[in-house]
Image (cartoon, rainbow, N blue to C red):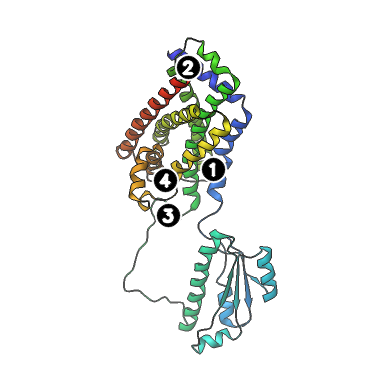
Amino acid sequence: MLANILNLGVKELRSLWRDPMMLLLIAYAFSLGIYVAASSMPETLHKAPIAIVDEDQSPLANRIAGAFYPPHFTAPAMTGLGEADAGMDAGDYTFALDIPPDFQRDVLAGRQPSVQLNVDATRMSQAFTGSSYIQQIVQGEVSEFMRGTRKATVPPVDLALRARFNPTLAQSWFGSVMEIINNVTMLSIVLTGAALIREREHGTIEHLLVMPVTPFEIMASKVWSMGVVVLVACAFALTGVIQGILQVPIEGSIPLFLAGAALHLFATTSMGIFMGTIARSMPQFGLLLMLVLLPLQLLSGGMTPRESMPEIVQQLMLAAPTTHFVKMAQAILYRGAGLDVVWPQLLALVVIGGFFFAIALARFRRTIGAMG
């Protein structure tokens, strides 16, 4: 039986090697896809282009203009009102700050003048964050100008903030690791489901039916072969892309994480085979994949904390392997947790994986029997 499982698994690897599109998907998902997810659409403001229309030409206006500098903003473009509007229309500026005439005189007289800020709201990630940044900068510069000193007022209580596990709040630290977790789930389901559908479409499943192999051996071969491919790609991405290129520190044990990933792959590859027995073609499998994959990723705790979800959703998602995998991965890779901390998640993955494997095997046997 072990020899049959080994030989059938090698056959699956050879079939995958002859599928260039699937190989390209794997290579992209665990290399460029991770880099793009880590470096694109940052939640913090970074090099936002801003134009300043200074109609006052006063020391206070110059002070406000000098408060905008990298890395949050690019060097301000000092333009006229017409040029700022044209730049906003062309997408050259995300923000255009208009300082009105007699601004400093009105501030000193206590008249509370208005400063106009135009925002290109199509750049959503910068627009929401940048508006509050600019408001704080302008108010801070005006307050310091009125006090005549940069000495900050001492609050009655000093709140000391310490960001643990990500001191600089770098988006790439979170985005890269979460992208690996999502890609492990996606590729494991896609590869196993596509392998089964590919055999049905090519007619090779009939060849297996006349061979002295059991449905368990056929399914186990697909699980281990596709799981090994994803696990090797995951290890490469974690060490080569995340640690090597992105320079993201990994706090915990990589072998322990890969062991947990292997248990997670046991469950997700079984899910892929189950979905492959339901779908009759690759287009059907793609539609079914969207219905299953999106809830698994969005509600697992990788996108938003589980505590912010409704209680019923939190309880239902305990039956999904991604929930426990995300919790285990974050504990190991971010916080340096050991086996004594993550063993409940590993145990849950074993139980869920066994359950999905049994269901997929029963469905696979019925499908094989119907074809025979």
Foreground disc of the pair 1, 3: 1
**Mark 3 surroundings: few (<14), some (14-19) or many (≥20) residues within 10 A:** few
Q: What is the C-alpha distance between the residues marked 4 and 2? A: 36 Å
The residue to which callout 3 is attached is 167
Sequence order check, earlier mark of 4 and 2: 2
Foreground disc of the pair 4, 1: 4
x, y percent for residue 162? 37, 58
Q: Secondary structure at mark 1?
A: helix
Does the image show residue 21?
Answer: yes
**Mark 4 surroundings: few (<14), some (14-19) or many (≥20) residues within 10 A:** many
Foreground disc of the pair 4, 2: 4
The residue to which callout 1 is attached is 34
The residue to which callout 4 is attached is 299
Q: Which is nearer the eye, 205 or 139?
A: 205
Q: What is the C-alpha distance between the residues marked 1 and 3? A: 21 Å
The residue drawn where x is 42% and y is 18% is: 216
**Mark 1 surroundings: few (<14), some (14-19) or many (≥20) residues within 10 A:** many
Q: Secondary structure at mark 3?
A: loop
- Name, please, the residue furthest toward the bottom: 109
Please state which amino acid type lies under the numbered disc 4: Leu
Side of 344 where 56 appears, left or right: right
Q: Which is nearer the eye, 212 or 98?
A: 212
Side of 254 where 41 appears, left or right: right
Contact? badges 1 and 3 (CB < 8 Å): no
Sequence order check, earlier mark of 1 and 2: 2
Q: Secondary structure at mark 4?
A: loop
Q: Quadrant of the N terminus?
A: top left
- Label annotation for residue 6: 2
Q: What is the C-alpha distance between the residues marked 1 and 2? A: 31 Å
Please state which amino acid type lies under the numbered disc 1: Ile
Sequence order check, earlier mark of 2 and 3: 2
